[in-house]
Amino acid sequence: MTRDHREVTTIDPTFFAEAVDVVGANHVLRDADVVAGYTADWTGRFTGTSPAVIRPGSTEEAQALVGLCRRHGVALALQGGNTGLSGGTVPLAGEVVCSLRRLTSLELDTVSGQVSVGAGVVLSDLQAAAEAAGWAYGVDFASRGSATLGGSVATNAGGMRVLRYGDTRAQLLGLTAVLGTGHVVSHMGGLIKDNTGYFLPGILCGSEGTLGLVTAARLRLVPRAPERVVALLAFGEVAGAIEAASTLRRQLRTLSAAELFLQPGMDLVRAHTGQAAPFGGPHGAYLLVEASDDRDPTADLSLAVDSLPGVAAVAVAADPLRAAELWRYREGHTDAINHHGTPHKLDVSLPPAVLADFVGRVPGVVESVSSGAEVWLFGHAADGNVHVNVTGIAPDDDAVDDAVFKLAAAMGGSVSAEHGIGTAKRRWLHLNRTEDEVAAFGVLKAALDPDGVLNPSVLLGG
């Protein structure tokens, strides 16, 4: 299914010849079958077309490519691991795909507890390298095996441990990027204190590749917390689970994750994975919590859980294999839902005080718009982020999206918690941003990408 697709613009053949001069013949891909692998998002909801995939191998090559695009009037769709869920990395308007997967440099500074990484480094590789050096990286999410650091910076990815370490922006100490003007900005020294003007990484982080092509980032690492205990708590209702997450966040210093999901999602994951039920019967809501420290946090977690009201059942895992099994109930949601049907993935956030009310109202709102649609709800309970997944509706049917986003905004929430606006959510940006804010976005775009070379269909649209 194609969405927001326009025919590929005719490009002067000399552009491709010059691109070969920049990156080499092996990195200008034009075979239709090969290119097709870069033109659909992970869910299958968004599919575009592209005349080519170009893969720069350095900042210098990326800079030359941007200059080439400016001269020829060619737009780029920037892509890392292509794990985005808002259509922001797909060439929906026929852009040339710029794949950054070749940018895989990784240099650890164990003294400062920092790392310099290329945009194409996969999250799991960074995590492994940090652990081997006696450190850890604070951002984690289920797509760690394919998501890249460049994409994480572009969307300011959050994930499952935001409550402990913060989102990607909180880890970012510097970056190297090619602006749409062709200029390179690079500030990779990693100084903790450096008040020398505008912090450009903070502007580029979360800009979804619309202002600059990030080629490398300087990130802070965090102390390892090798002792870990995971518990799955069952509740009769969502409100009890969310209140428990808030209480644990206040009381448990070692809390590193608090993930919410419901019985329908549990059933779907179990059907997909073949896992046994964790308890003897169904429950209204589940809260998966993890505590980690340099000493065994089991006793502290047990004491905190014992003080919680409304806990109907508890399963605890202190060994890694059992902990992975409990995590699979939560992390298996994305695969299970995608296997069940092409989903509308509506990533929103709400003030904690109204999160339970929102979760309770969403199924009715969806049913009122699209009878027969199925709703799957899960997310990060402690930071108010809930992933609303809806199956059973056409990929290009926006009625459900409209209803859910308007409900979230009306309750004081955001239409995008961590996956960005992309192309999928452009028409709802006004629900969270004023006209003056959007105008300021436009001023930045015009200043840093005056020719609209970088992701012109994303965020503000073209």
Image (tube, rainbow, N blue to C red):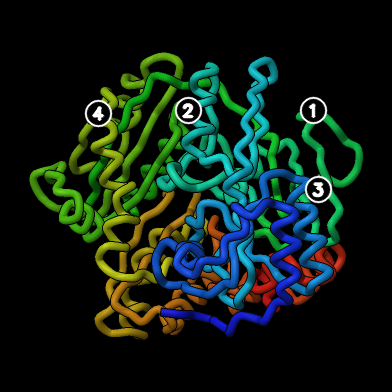
Q: Secondary structure at mark 4?
A: helix
- Disc 2 or disc 4, which is closer to the eye? 2
Q: Is residue 309 above or below residue 127?
A: below
Could you tell me which residue is drawn at 59 percent across and 62 percent down?
53
Instruction: Tell me the amino acid under the disc marked 2.
Output: Ala
Where the N terminus falls, by quadrant?
bottom left
Could you tell whether 143 is left or right of 370 in the image? right
- From the image, tell me which residue sits under label 4: 321
- From the image, tell me which residue sits under label 1: 191
Q: Position of residue 229 (x, y in %)?
A: 33, 26
Q: Position of residue 233 (x, y in %)?
A: 26, 41
Q: Position of residue 320 (x, y in %)?
A: 29, 26
Lower sequence index among marks 1 and 2: 2
Q: Tell me the tag on residue 200.
A: 3
Could you tell whether 132 is left or right of 321 in the image? right
- From the image, tell me which residue sits under label 2: 128
Separation of disc 1 and disc 3 at Cα? 14 Å
Separation of disc 2 and disc 4 at Cα? 18 Å
